[in-house]
Image: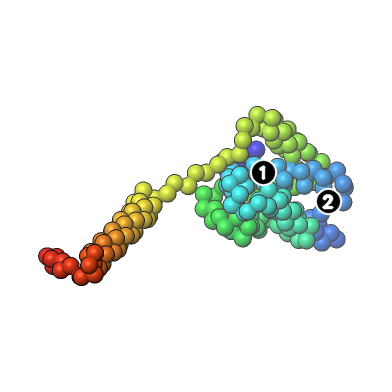
Amino acid sequence: MNFSNIDASAFCEAISPKTNLLFDDEKQQANFELGVSMMIYKWDALDVAVSNNWGGPDSAEKRDWISTIVIELFQNNKYVDIQMIEETLLYAMVDEFETNVEDDSSLPISAGILEIWKNCAQNDYTIPQALYQAWTEKQKTQTGPRKVEIVNDPLNGTDSSEESDQDYDDDESMMVDQEGDLEMDQESNNEPIIDDDGFELVQPKSKR
């Protein structure tokens, strides 16, 4: 598919008396749904969000749900254009993955879905079958999920400051223990000393 010249005003419309864009032929509908799913899986922004679980542990299921709501656009409407598809994709990313996609990558995905519907209407299943073949080959060679590493701010010294506070607390408690021992020694030195005859010995006063 060539997306270099995307017509953002492109649309598809059901012919009366049909009131929606659902295919009556099962093969047409099956290939269209396959094509939608493959285009959704082809979207890099969503792939990164799923790989990093930005939508939580159900991120993969949420991606399949996005395919479902796009398909339902065609099942529930007589008229669908690129803007409707794109808005559906972008809103789903915000609602389910808390991700605001601003790189216009949703536009070629939306255009591709619309083109697949038009091709399936002509019994042409080349695109969805090619996308599926490419996806299966990718699964064989893919080594692992695409991860995005979030690096902590180097200017944020919370860890070192917490360690410093802990060290200070330890030093302070040691000082308190030493002072307590000193006071006990002083108190013991002030106790009266009695000789063998029962007389109290006079002790020299300590200098402070």
- Which of disc 1 and disc 2 is earlier in sequence? 2
User: Which is nearer the eye, 66 or 113?
Assistant: 66
SS class, disc 1: helix
Instruction: Return the x and y of residue 30 as percentages of the image width and height.
Output: 82, 45
- Judge from the rendering whether residue 48 lies leftward or rightward of residue 22; answer left or right: left
Residue denoted by label 1: 41
Which kind of residue does numbered mark 1 sit on? Tyr
Disc number at residue 194? none
Q: Residue at x 84, y 59 (%)?
A: 18
Query: Residue at 79% of width from left, 57% of height from top?
Result: 75
192 relative to 143 in the view: left or right: left
In the displayed structure, 111 sits above or below 75; it is above
Q: Residue at x 71, y 51 (%)?
A: 61
Viewer-proximal residue among 194 and 145: 194
For mark 2, give the secondary structure: loop
Placement of the C terminus among the 4 image quadrants: bottom left
Asked whether residue 92 is in view, the answer is yes
Residue ID at (20%, 70%): 200
- Residue 62 is situated, as x and y percent measured from the top left of the image, at 68, 53
Q: CA distance from mark 2 to mark 1?
A: 22 Å
Dot 1 crowding, Cα within 10 Å, few <14, some 14–19, many 20+: some
The amino acid type of the residue labelled 2 equals Phe
Q: Nearer the viewer, residue 46 or 123?
A: 46
Residue hosting label 2: 23
- In the image, residue 203 sits, relative to residue 168, either above or below, namely below
Comparing labels 2 and 1, the label whose residue is closer to the camera: 1
Q: Residues within 10 Å of mark 2 (few under 14, many from 20)?
A: some
